[in-house]
Image (cartoon, helix red, strand yellow):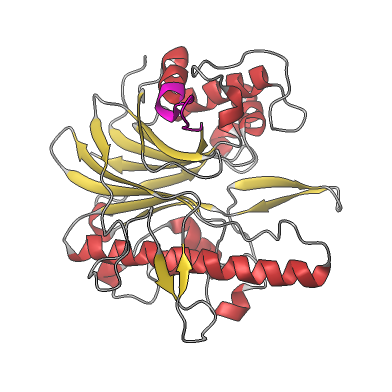
Amino acid sequence: MTAPPPVLRIATYNVEWFDRLFDDLGRGYEDDQPSARYGISRGTQLGALGIVFTALDADGIMIIEGPDTTKTRSTVRALEGFAAKFGLRARRAVHGFSSETEQEIAFLYDPDRITAHHDPQGEATGRRDSPLSPRFDGVFRYDLDNDSAPDTIRFSKPPLELAVTLKDGRRMRMIGVHAKSKNPHGATDEAQAIRISIENRRKQLAQCIWLRARVDEILKAGENVMVMGDFNDGPGLDEFEKLFGKSGVEIVLGQDADPAMRLKDPHANMALCSRMGFCPTTARFWLAPQKRYFEALLDFIMLSPGLMKPVPEWRIWHPFQDPRILGKRDLSEALLQASDHFPVTVDLPL
């Protein structure tokens, strides 16, 4: 086990179908059977993830699409077994509300440097008269289509809300996110695809408005917060943004808020300033009809103003864009085999 770095390193990583790599006892498959990633075996994907997590050497990793929790399966058991197998410092796992989709949000962390526990805020029932936004396993009411009738919004993957304490006693809150996908799953023609995409876009934006409400509550209470994960969205990502004025990411960042209430992520800022030019990317998908890859900026780590001094350093572990990875063949291949997303880290000087 290597010595910890002189910074607090936090990561977010969407691991495509991590759940399919474990049996019911949380033991990783190391065989040649196919994983859920095209053309990659379970053993190859698991080994690649071991290489990536070891290279990250993070104090905490917000895992998106983590192993499932059911009556027979355990997110925590699988992740802690995975950490033990590869000798990771981040070896303790915490999981919040279960997902409906076999894709859990969990936090794997180094207990020698930080402590973390699930600490959901808000009313469990989402009471109409509550001064707080509802708990993330509840219901959020918002008028999506401007018909004066509030729609009810739920998370199929409820965000993981954590209370985190550093070894020196400093505290912060973290929220792990896997927002609604905008893809028109189930569409049979172009018109239906457009209708479903717009409906999904409205739901994704409503989830981001819900997240922003929680951020406002945390900042008004004088606490620091990190919001991270896969937002299935980004500034200038698609034409549907024109219908709604802004992206969900901009809503969570609080682009129109007072500077003291805005969250920071330099990759999002680059996208905002470069809609027609270069933009960093965190995910890589194969488009079968076009026979090519499509890349997008979907994964973020957003920091509140109180975490910006000293200045943190963000990094996207992209095998084709990060010069620190280009010369490392094993790591480059592992990043491509492990998931369709690449990890994002932020280093907070201690």
Identify whether 143 is placed above or below 89: below
Image quadrant holding the C terminus, namely top left
Q: In the picture provided, is 311 more to the left or to the right than 191?
A: left
Residue 74 highlighted magenta (yes or no): yes
User: x%, y% of residue 325?
Assistant: 57, 33
Extent of the magenta region: 68-78
Residue at the image point whose x is 30% and y is 36% from the top: 8
Asked whether residue 65 is in view, the answer is yes
Residue 293 highlighted magenta (yes or no): no
Determine the main secondary structure of the stretch shown in magenta. loop
Quarter of the view holding residue 102 = top right
Quarter of the view holding residue 162 = top left
Asked whether residue 236 is in view, the answer is no
Image quadrant holding the N terminus, namely top left
Q: In the picture provided, is 249 more to the left or to the right than 114?
A: right
Residue at the image point whose x is 31% and y is 62% from the top: 214
Residue situated in front as seen by the camera: 3 or 128: 128
User: x%, y% of residue 242?
Assistant: 61, 78
User: x%, y% of residue 203?
Assistant: 53, 66
Identify whether 212 is placed above or below 65: below
User: x%, y% of residue 81?
Assistant: 44, 17
